[in-house]
Image (cartoon, rainbow, N blue to C red):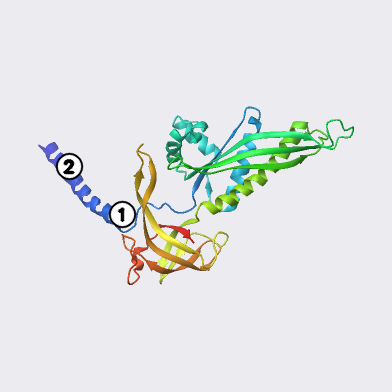
Amino acid sequence: MKRINLLFTLTFCLVICVLTITPSISAQRLSGESSPKGGKPRIVVLATASSTTTWTTNVTTATLEDALTQSGRFEVIAGAQRDRLLKEQGFNNSDLVDPQQATKVGKLLSARYIIVGNALDVTVKKKGGGFSPIDLGSEIKTRIQVQMIDAETGIVKTSKSFEEKANKPTATGVQTDNDAIRDAYRKAMEAIATKFVAEMGETVPTETVVLLVRGGRVALDIGGEQVKVGQEFEIYTQDEPILGPDGKPRGYITTKYARLRVAEIEPGLSWATVIATYDENGAPDAAMKLERIKKNMAAKRVK
């Protein structure tokens, strides 16, 4: 009898907890307190190559990762972490570029975008012509295709081919001819990575999160190296996915709650003034309601 009473008591408590938590969750979604999707977008980098340029993959990955990290706008998933997580779940690097698997892998890595650098061709041309009696070094021409894949939908958002030339000096001392070619490829790839990240920055909106709301101002987790006074941000949440016929998400239902204008910049954060707030249907509030803005809500730059 005591066991029955104890079981009944535990079951009753569990039901009460569920009934108590469920309305709270619903209210939380309505108030905008969903899991934040803002902040620096997480990115995973992968390199591929033709059968004759497989030696380029490490350099391609490293230069793209360095350029993305130095931009200060993205959180780059380290290669070792990427490989470990993929191996644990039975995936491999090729699954990152497979449209059928990209969304699964992106979700596993919590990545927003997948960057793929593909070395299409690396050619070496001797300066002065092939019959020149003087070794003037060589010129390396590199062709690289770089793609940005939306990890949530598997759709290629950006795809561009780059061509870069670099000089390969005559190998001297202990340096072999192959070493000189690799050094020249690295220089070319560094230039390509810088160009791609600059163009990618125009495609991907600057994102951040709310740190604090106080005195009619909002502190954003973004410093002066990424934002300027006068730029505007939109506070929003993304909730239910919009599914395609194949059951995969094509986007998310987005609800905006406020519009901000950056007024002051500090090294590690920015202060913005609220210029408008909106209800759950996106209609402007007649009188601004600062209580709509919560800590950890997402914010993205708007033009």
Q: Secondary structure at mark 1?
A: helix
Q: Report the residue at 16% width, 39% height from top.
A: 7
Task: Determine which residue is flagged by label 1.
Answer: 29
- Quick one: label 2, few (<14), some, or many (20+) residues within 10 Å? few
- The reply to whether residue 77 is in sight is no
The numbered dot on residue 299 is: none
Q: Nearer the viewer, residue 289 or 192?
A: 192
Q: Report the residue at 43% width, 42% height from top.
A: 153
Q: Secondary structure at mark 2?
A: helix
Circle 2: residue type = Thr
Circle 1: residue type = Arg
Q: Give the Cα distance between marks 2 and 1.
A: 27 Å
- The reply to whether residue 259 is in sight is yes
Return the disc, 2 or 1, that comes first in the chain's sequence.
2
Indicate whether 226 appears above or below 108.
below
**Place of residue 235 in the rendered image (x, y in percent of width and height, measured from the top left):** 41, 60
- Quick one: label 1, few (<14), some, or many (20+) residues within 10 Å? some
Q: Report the residue at 59% width, 49% height from top.
A: 197
The numbered dot on residue 11 is: 2
